[in-house]
Image (cartoon, rainbow, N blue to C red):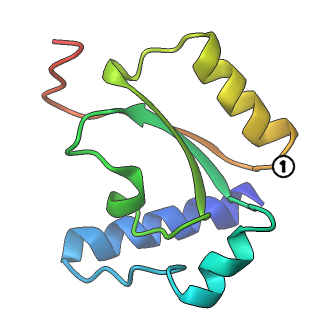
Amino acid sequence: NPLTAWKALKEGNERFVAGKPQHPSQSIEHRASLAAEQKPTAVVFGCADSRVAAEIIFDQGLGDMFVVRTAGHVVDSAVLGSIEYAVTILGVPLVVVLGHDSCGAVG
């Protein structure tokens, strides 16, 4: 559900900010399970800026999030199609739009 997904992202960000990431969902077994299917709990749409990697700042692992990134987090048909795919086909319950300061693409 969206509240559980949001809580996981908040807790992961708190670990990142505190400098205590857990790097979840990266075991050999978990990676093997992803070959068959993905079940992300959140879509994160954000900037392609190398300083704002959603998986790292939310301390999430492989398959935990469906991430869509563009320079300046600009929305186009590819972005909308990707988000729509995640929500309608994968059943992702939460969509997060992630902005940041000092974005060179937006100025």
Horizontal side of residue 48 vs 18, given as left or right: right
Q: Taking 21 as reference, is 3 above or below it?
A: above
Please state the horizontal and vertical placement of residue 16, each as a whole percent of the image: 28, 70
Mark count: 1
Amino acid bearing label 1: Gly
Q: Taking 101 as reference, is 4 above or below it?
A: below
Residue found 33% across the figure and 50% down from its top: 53
Horizontal side of residue 19 vs 77, given as left or right: left
The quadrant in which residue 49 appears is top left
Q: Nearer the viewer, residue 43 or 4?
A: 43
Residue 32 visible somewhere in the drawing: yes
Please state the horizontal and vertical placement of residue 29, each as a whole percent of the image: 64, 89
The N terminus: image quadrant: bottom right
Q: Taking 107 as reference, is 31 above or below it?
A: below
Please state the horizontal and vertical placement of residue 30, each as a whole percent of the image: 63, 82
Residue 98 visible somewhere in the drawing: no
How many residues crowd mark 1 within 10 Å: few (<14), some (14–19), many (20+)? Answer: some
Residue found 63% across the figure and 52% down from its top: 42
Element type at marker 1? loop
Residue found 13% across the figure and 28% down from its top: 102
The C terminus: image quadrant: top left
Please state the horizontal and vertical placement of residue 50, each as a whole percent of the image: 22, 42
Look at mark 1 in the image and give the residue it sits on.
Answer: 91
Q: Nearer the viewer, residue 41 or 71?
A: 71
